[in-house]
Amino acid sequence: MGRYDSPAALAALVQPHQVHRDIYTDQEVFQQEMKHLFANAWVFVGHESQTPNKGDYFSTHIGTQPVIQVRHSTGDIHVLLNRCPHKGTKIVIDRQGNTGKFFRCPYHAWSFKTDGCLLAIPLKKGYQNTGLEETDSGKGMRSVGDVKNYRGFIFARLAEEGMSFEEFFGDSLTSLDNMVDRSPAGRLEVVGPPLRYLHHCNWKMLVENQTDTCHPMVAHESSAGTAVKLYEEMGLPEDAPKPPAMEIIAPFMSPYEFFEGMGIRTWPNGHGHTGVNHSIHSDYSAIPGYFEALCDSYGEEKAKAILDENRHNTVYFPNIMIKGPIQQLRVFIPIAADRTVVESYIYRLVDAPDELTARTAMYNRMINAPTSIVGHDDLEMYERAQEGLMVDGLEWVNIQRLIDEDEDFEVEAVENGTTERQMRNQFHAWVKFMTMGHKAEAAE
Amino acid sequence: MTVTRESLIDFIYDEVRMLDEGRFTEWLNLWLPDGHYWMPLDYQQKDPINETSLMYEDMFMLKLRVERLNGARTFSQKPKSRCHHVIQRPYVDQMDMEAGRFVTTTFMHYVETRLDEQQLLAVTARHDLALVDGALRIANKRVDIVNCDAAFRNIQLLP
Ligand code: FES
Ligand SMILES: [Fe+2]
């Protein structure tokens, strides 16, 4: 019996205005997250353009579970657990490839169709009358509980039963819609491999930071503030083209009022976004030919509406963030209570000018690379917090900025851009999905 | 100056020594104003612009990187990172005396450290050098990390 194997013990870690540090530091809580939260929630897997052709696969993780996204012979995408049902060998080990019509385990050559069904076993007569069909091993590679391809983005739920995709995401899908609509063809394509950055901190610190609007002007003063200072020292005339870095990095130094006015929206089940009214992405320069291409596809009115949305960071609970205006997606992959790998992907807007992809690639490397000066500012704060949380006797983390009495997270809300409501929303959802599995078990 | 193989090789040795000794302002002065420091993300990457790189920095970004190291509120550089290069003798791949353009390739081990952590990277650096006003300058530099697809910890200084 561990300290945290009861729903009551887990729920007690979250109070309306604070959360207990064990949520970030305790390995047993982490294991419970993998068992319940990451099984009950809909978790991002990959993008369909990573597996464009039949037999194409891409290997990744849902929480700590190794999975394979694969394009089946019928053209649809399946998500299989990356484990041979015979003795456990991982079926694929490279990050992506093409397996042809079937997977073949490299250990004893059991083979499986690309939907996981058992195809053949060498020397099969050795299993005659042994009852293999009755065992899990005889059933082929196991699939996840459910898969959804939403406008090219693949999500999966590990649990066999649970909330539907539509109920889980609800109106939060408007952020994904806006990102995809920005392509005149209504389609995105992944560009290159993701940046991969190892953090010595809990995965939730990164998720919370996505809507933490009171940190940029402080933690990023060293990078964004210095950029502004360098630019001023150059003494360029107003109308001279600014160094590209200024467009990307300088808005991080915007004052508190800017972030207050930006607004935060929260949706049920832990999703939310910053940048309801405007954002640090609002003032990017126009790319010639882009608006025209959008108008051709959608008509002027809709094209304007698409570009008028400048949502900053949209958090999809539990562990991704997207930036619609620059087609970036970051996934916070949990490794252990104090280990997280962040993968930052970018996508190309099909049929849009290349300059947009160039800006997106620039943003990705300037802000989110392990070599970035901005990303390093953030990492420093997370890791200091991870170490600071070991202090005994002061064991709660505060999340009460702009808290209201009786907040109802089951309804959508729009509030002042510096509220910590979205963090509270995430923890509300955390309790919900952490204890959901327990209840089902208890009922069995 | 007359550029010889030896002077090109010495240039590379002097450059890494500047970096290891933290003489970053002096290092910036080696660069031509329109140069780029490129560190690809993908193995054998061809395009620095329309794909993600680890770094593709113009002089403004490189100056910002150096300037930031000295800022009073650069919390993530308190204490500062330090670096150390061990390099093989550079290959001189091209010597175009007439144009004053030169290309070298250098294999190196790069160590960066801060507090209790130390990271070792095996890298290949390609330098495009130019003879301008009698001095060798860096026109462009490309640094490929052999395990570019790995999940990295911070890389804050300059391999
Ligand atoms: S472990 Fe896969 S076939 Fe034996
Ligand atoms: Fe930040």
Image (cartoon, rainbow, N blue to C red):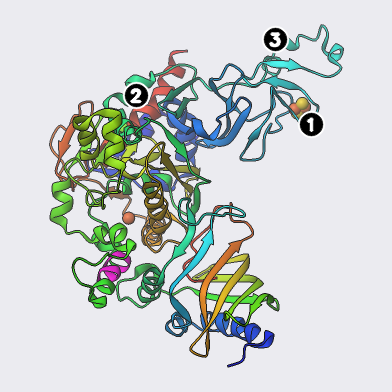
Query: Badge 3: few (under 14), some or many (20 or more) residues near its Cα, within 10 Å?
Result: few
Residue highlighted by disc 3: A134
Ligand 1 is within 8 Å of the C-beta of the residue at disc 3 = no
**Between B95 and A442, the one nearer to me in the picture:** B95
Residue highlighted by disc 1: A107
Distance of label 2 from label 3 (alpha carbons): 34 Å
Query: Badge 2: few (under 14), some or many (20 or more) residues near its Cα, within 10 Å?
Result: many
**Between A114 and A308, the one nearer to me in the picture:** A308
Distance of label 1 from label 2 (alpha carbons): 39 Å
Q: Are marks 3 and 1 on the same chain?
A: yes
Residue A377 placed where, x, y %? 36, 62
Label 3 is placed on what type of residue? Glu
Query: Extreme bottom residue here?
Result: B1
Residue A102 placed where, x, y %? 70, 23
Residue at x 38%, y 31% (from the top left corner): A185
Which chain does the numbered disc 2 sit on? Answer: A
Secondary-structure class at tag 2: helix
Residue at x 62%, y 88% (from the top left corner): B3
Quarter of the displayed picture in which ligand 1 can be seen: top right
Secondary structure mainly formed by the magenta segment: helix
Q: Are marks 3 and 1 in contact (CB under 8 Å)?
A: no
Extent of the magenta region: A222-228
Residue highlighted by disc 2: A168
Ligand 1 is within 8 Å of the C-beta of the residue at disc 1 = yes
Q: Are marks 2 and 3 on the same chain?
A: yes
Q: First in sequence: mark 1 or mark 2? A: 1
